[in-house]
Amino acid sequence: MIFTFFARGDFASGHVGCGGTPPGKACRVTGSGIASLVKQSVDIVEEIGRAVRLRRSGNRHIGLCPFHQEKTPSFQVDADSQLYYCFGCGSGGDVLSFVMKHRNLAFPDAVKYLADRYNIPLPEKDHARDELFEASREERKRILAAVECAAEFFYRQLHMSAEGRAARDYIAARGLPAQVVEAQKLGYAPGGRDRLFEHLRKSGIEPALAVKAGLLGQNANDPSKFYDRFRNRLIFPIRDERDTVVAFGGRILPQGDGNEPKYLNSPETPVYHKGRMLYQYSVARQACGKVRQALLVEGYMDLLSFHAQGFYRVVATLGTALTAQQVRLLGRMSDEVVLAYDGDDAGERAMLRALPLFLSEELSVSCIRFPGGLDPDDFLKKFGLSELERLIGQREELGAYTVRKAVSSWDGSSAGKMRIFSELQPVFQSVRQPLLRSEYLRIIADRFLISEKVAEDQLLYDKQGRVEPVRAYARPSGYRKQPQIESLEEKVLRLMIKYPALVRCVRESDVLGCFEEPGFAAMAGLLCQAGFCSAEDSDPSSVYDLLRESDLHELYTRYLLEPYDLEEPEIQLRDWLEALARRATKKRKKELERSLREAERTGDRDRVASLLVEIRNLGVKTNMGDL
């Protein structure tokens, strides 16, 4: 694919300078066909917004970086250039690099992922679709086919086998209606170590693929032997956002081995990432279309109890603690999340651990507490949906609940007071919204009979005696500090990127050979080879495509998105180019003088004469300003 730009001979000041490019002269930048087609069809803000809670700030979108832990947002997405950069960890690139890093995908998988998500038709024949692309796509298809084959096997075992009666009796005892069982395609994994293995083998699915799909385990002592991962369990198919079965959860049946875990989940696979998915997400997303409030529970059976009552705005975690990625998924479909965890102490501890994640994402979160230590399933069976809806109506904001619970445990001692402040510090390190912070401080101040200012100072007090300032959202100082002194190469490169019209100045100055930093020299050389483009017509995404190394990608996005405005960029550039040339001349002169001393020491008169001429010519060039 060819990208074409037309240089108009001007930039912001209306004057190109440095020779310019005649109006209408085209700059041609080639891109990789399929990848460019996909990138042109996908809005980076929309795609990253699916994973990161973004907030508009001027012409940028800002949020917390998904690639490192941070409290002050330093992650920026630029819709104009279709690039992103984190000024905290230095990660940057285009929409493909984001998907590759965030979803741990290879390049061809990321292209296919975006093409599938946005219904982008890919050409049947294209040189860019190489063997790696095909191999990755085919492997994913084979894994999904193996998972679907296993799902059908489990379903038939539940409904059509005599052995499945134990699972059917368990379902009946738990009160799950037949329509829920059928809608979810629940299944049964029979006992024995090779029942699924034999079924997959007869279906033409190789054991190695089944292991990769998370269906079989492999004997550690004898890799040629395989065994069923799920045995004597009620099976819950797990679907992705597109409602495709990608994994399974299994609950041990009452007569099962007491040494086995109660719940067993598929391991991470190329199609299943448990920390980035939620059980029944696609169903809940549809149900939240009108009421943007979602319930979050911990167990599969708890969730299906809601479905049995006709309530579908509910999702569950997948056997792990709640993650930041899952909170972002919740934020995509809802404006408020209500935690409906078990009413025992373990459920409450899990709920309180989740609070900082919601505060960091600025997603409203509240909680309901079930009486008598009941779990959601037991509560719904005993009291029904109407009573649950009454509880939801009486829900309490989770942060306020956490603070009240903490201060209510005070025993009246100074040590007890300090312990409570220490426990609440992580909460205040995460909360950004002034209203919530004020509410939490009021609760603490009322309980300890102190001012809110004293309470806040203590919460922000560290062991070195410092009071850390309150962090504001999206402040520029959240950027990672860059070196105070920039090299000449870095200054020139910044101007080449921020003011594309000045690239010709660099090319015509012939100072690329003066660059001492290889990375800067490589990027400047590529920019010069790409040709001149004006600020209005240049396409940063296409320039980005020219850079093959990931380090250069991140450097380019940083320089492009970082503020760097100058009143007279052309004059400043000329000064820096001359400084580069003077530095190179000075360095060369020192080298010649060293050689001259060596020639004089050895008595090489011809060499001495030649070096003297070269040194004299360097001085003449410098004085005349030829460089």
Image: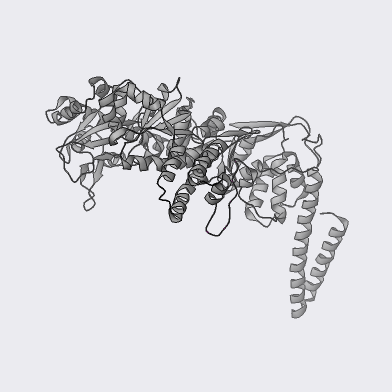
Give the left or right position of residue 439, taking residue 81 as reference: left
| Residue extending furthest toward the left | 162
Residue 549: percent from left, percent from top: 56, 47
Residue 538: percent from left, percent from top: 68, 34
Residue 451 among magenta residues: no
Give the left or right position of residue 557, taking residue 314 as reference: right
Report the magenta residues as a range. Answer: 463-472
Quadrant of the image containing the N terminus? top right
Image quadrant where residue 194 sits: top left
Residue 540: percent from left, percent from top: 64, 37
Q: Residue at x 81, y 40 (%)?
A: 19
Examine the rendered structure and indicate whether residue 26 appears above or below residue 262. Answer: above
Quadrant of the image containing the C terminus? bottom right
Examine the rendered structure and indicate whether residue 555 appears above or below residue 365. Answer: below
| Residue extending furthest toward the right | 624
Give the left or right position of residue 369, taking residue 364 as reference: left
Give the left or right position of residue 560, taking residue 43 as reference: right
Q: Is residue 188 visible?
A: yes
Q: Is residue 323 visible?
A: no
Instruction: Identify the main secondary structure in magenta.
Output: loop
Q: Nearer the viewer, residue 375 or 4?
A: 375
Residue 449: percent from left, percent from top: 51, 46
Q: Nearer the viewer, residue 110 or 569?
A: 569
Image quadrant where residue 62 sits: top right
